[in-house]
Image: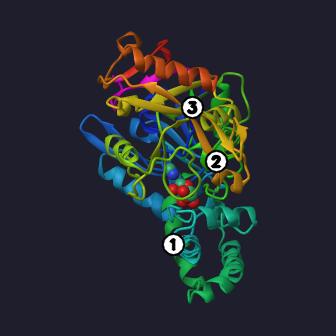
Amino acid sequence: MFYTVIGTQWGDEGKGKIVDWLSSKADIVVRFQGGNNAGHTLQIEDKTYKLNLLPSGIIRGKKCIIGNGVVLDPWALDEEIQKLSDQGIKINPDNLMIAENICLILPLHKIIDELNEKNKGTEFIGTTKKGIGPAYEDKVGRRSIRLCDLQNEEILRKKISNLASFHSYRLKHFEKNIDETDLFIQLKNINKKINSYSYPTWRILNEIGKKNETILFEGAQGALLDIDFGTYPYVTSSNTTSGQIFAGSGFGIRKDHKIFGITKAYTTRVGSGPFPTELKDYMGDYLGKKGKEFGTVTKRKRRCGWFDVNLVKQSVKISGIDDVILTKLDVLDEIKEIKICVGYTVNDFKYDYLPSNENLQNNIKPIYKIFPGWQKSTFGIKKWSDLPKNAKKYVDAIQNMIETKISVISTGPERSQTIDKDNYLGSI
Ligand code: IMP
């Protein structure tokens, strides 16, 4: 069986707990997009593990693949491996395999990411400044240095020189330059540490696919940050929707593939860009504080707002999501009246989806439906029947409006704090 976990909003939906749960049941865990802009914190017994690039399965001793759809900062990887090894996690080429055709994030990409942001005024996209966008630009521009290029000095020198000449004009403008010899030495040195992890991972995955083993594809970020379907240009530079699973790992579409969408019971986003249901008042602050809404990677305060049906319904359809897992319901416990955005109006026209036009996006007015709160704690509840009546009504309303089953509700950070309606997660 094959499983995928995808965020249906702007990331930070609480994927970590579910990914950890599923990865404990999987034989192999695969990342297929993004890079170290992602951040998962896993709490297992009394230990806290922080992951950015490595698939979560690494903590559970599972085989892990970083697929070709990811952009790899080899120095960040080395640091992450070091930190986790210091915490007693075993990482070696038997349990970590990296696609040999993966494109690398270089120090120059981080510089460009920073310059792009500064250049546009206060904050443009509000990126994580990890060099993600510039690295993907070089990938599509057919200039990237890939992991396999580190094997051959002649090819590596040629590629470095090509990159340096491509970026020199822009960097010179900011009084920065690329020292080609230094970059060559840095890459040769890091290659000694990471090259043993390099494999044609698509072959490994296809072999495993034949053996009836369980594969988990771990999505990073969220569907609304997708380069095609997100709130462009305020997005990340990869496809975060399910289509990317296949191109980003080299594993084709199979029958027995279940796609879970992780959805927060309200909405958050970090960085700039449209956010129709954003609350800039005390309620936004309240959700932020109660939900501990601070970015894992950049520590930035997340923007908070009401649940938006249009956005989630759209994400669910684009990714072909089978079941939704609703998280952080307990954050709403004390609120008297809870709003759900059920549609938009722009200049008197009604929309039941987010139009792509930026001007329309900026002028959207949400249409809200008000739901009475339940004002009782739902924290840690394990059974659907134990939820307060109004909490059930809230969940049922979302389920009906997004036209997708909510089969699991997470009521706290622990695995036991979960309502697994049909014992689906429990039985995997
Ligand atoms: P980048 O991925 O660093 O280029 O950032 C582009 C946008 O995606 C910014 O708004 C970031 O805040 C957002 N972003 C990137 N990674 C994550 C994530 O893992 N969670 C939430 N937002 C993210």
Where are the magenta residues, as a range?
A: 405-417
Circle nearer the N terminus (3, 1) = 1
Element type at mark 3 = strand
**Secondary element type, mark 1:** loop
Where 235 sits versus 384, above or below? below
Residue 261, disc: 3
Q: Residue at x 40, y 46 (%)?
A: 284
Structural crowding at the residue carrying mark 3, measured as other residues with C-alpha within 10 Å and reported as few (<14), some (14–19) or many (≥20) = many
Q: Amino acid at mark 3?
A: Gly
User: Is residue 1 shown to the viewer in this render?
Assistant: no
Residue 159's tag is none
Q: Residue 411, relative to residue 81: is it above or below? A: above
Is label 2 in a helix, a strand or a loop? Answer: loop
To which residue does mark 2 refer?
Answer: 364
Name the kind of residue labelled 2 in the image.
Ile
**Residue that label 1 marks:** 122
The figure's colour scheme reads rainbow
Mark pair 2, 3: CA separation = 25 Å
Q: Position of residue 182 (x, y in %)?
A: 53, 82
**Image quadrant in which you'd find residue 214:** top right
User: In the depicted view, which residue is nearer to us: 387 or 25?
Assistant: 387
Is 56 or 389 nearer to us in this picture? 389
Q: Residue at x 60, y 49 (%)?
A: 225
Q: Amino acid at mark 1?
A: Thr
Q: Is residue 384 magenta?
A: no
**Rendered location of residue 71, percent (x, y):** 60, 57
C-alpha span from label 2 to label 1 = 24 Å
- Nearest the camera: 118 or 32? 118
Q: Give coordinates of residue 39: x percent, y percent.
A: 44, 49
> Which dot, 2 or 3, sits closer to the camera?
2
